[in-house]
Amino acid sequence: MLIGISPVIGPDLLDTLFRMGHGDEIVLADAFFTGDSLNSRVIRADGLRIPDLLDGILALINLDSYVEHPVVMMQPVPGDELDLSVERSYREVIDRRWPGTPPTERMERFAFYERAKKAFAVVMTGETVKYGNIILKKGVIPVSR
């Protein structure tokens, strides 16, 4: 255990966050997501909920301030109803850790899958809410001299 790092951040996730560069994306996927089919770098976080992971991750990295939407979620398919409390629970963490983050972008399901293919990594969680997948774009940390 490391001091100051949330216990939900396992060694594989910590290594991945360290290796990600500015503009790289990480997908926090629900338990039903097709992570292994879409991306070769999959990290297991079974049993963990996405808001808890968001809190641990966003204590270690910042979001990209050079893009319009550093946070992306999947939009529902026609005929499905969106549970707005899911995004609210994510935004509560995001806005507490990184106030001023632009609104979350919603992306069509198959476009989201295509973006997940290009992501730096996919974290498979224990999240079971519908449309709970989220993509984060890592920012650059200002360097002081």
Image: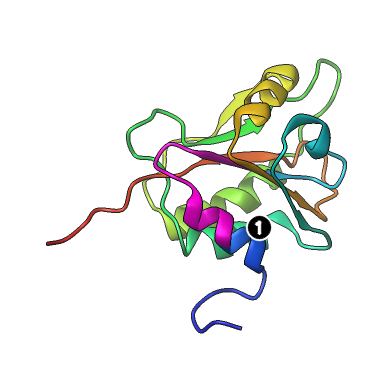
Furthest residue toward top = 78
Residue 39: where, in percent of width, then height?
Answer: 72, 34
Q: Quadrant of the N terminus?
A: bottom right
Q: Compared with residue 9, is residue 20 higher up or lower down, i.e. above or below?
A: above
Residue 4: where, in percent of width, then height?
Answer: 49, 79
Range of the magenta residues? 15-27
Q: Compared with residue 107, is residue 32 higher up or lower down, i.e. above or below?
A: below
Left or right of 72: which side holds 123?
Answer: right
Q: Residue at x 59, y 74 (%)?
A: 6
Q: Nearer the viewer, residue 143 or 28?
A: 143
Residue 27: where, in percent of width, then height?
Answer: 65, 41
Left or right of 76: which side holds 53?
Answer: left
Left or right of 31: which side holds 132?
Answer: left
Residue placed under numbered mark 1 in the picture: 51
> Magenta stretch: residue 22 in it?
yes
Q: Compared with residue 78, is residue 85 higher up or lower down, i.e. above or below?
A: below
Disc 1 is placed on an element classified as helix
Residue density around tag 1, few if under 14, some if 14–19, many if 20 or more, within 10 Å: many
Q: Residue at x 36, y 46 (%)?
A: 100
Q: Amino acid at mark 1?
A: Pro
Q: Residue at x 81, y 15 (%)?
A: 78
Q: Quadrant of the C terminus?
A: bottom left
Answer with the quarter of the image where residue 111 lies.
Answer: top right
> Magenta stretch: residue 81 in it?
no
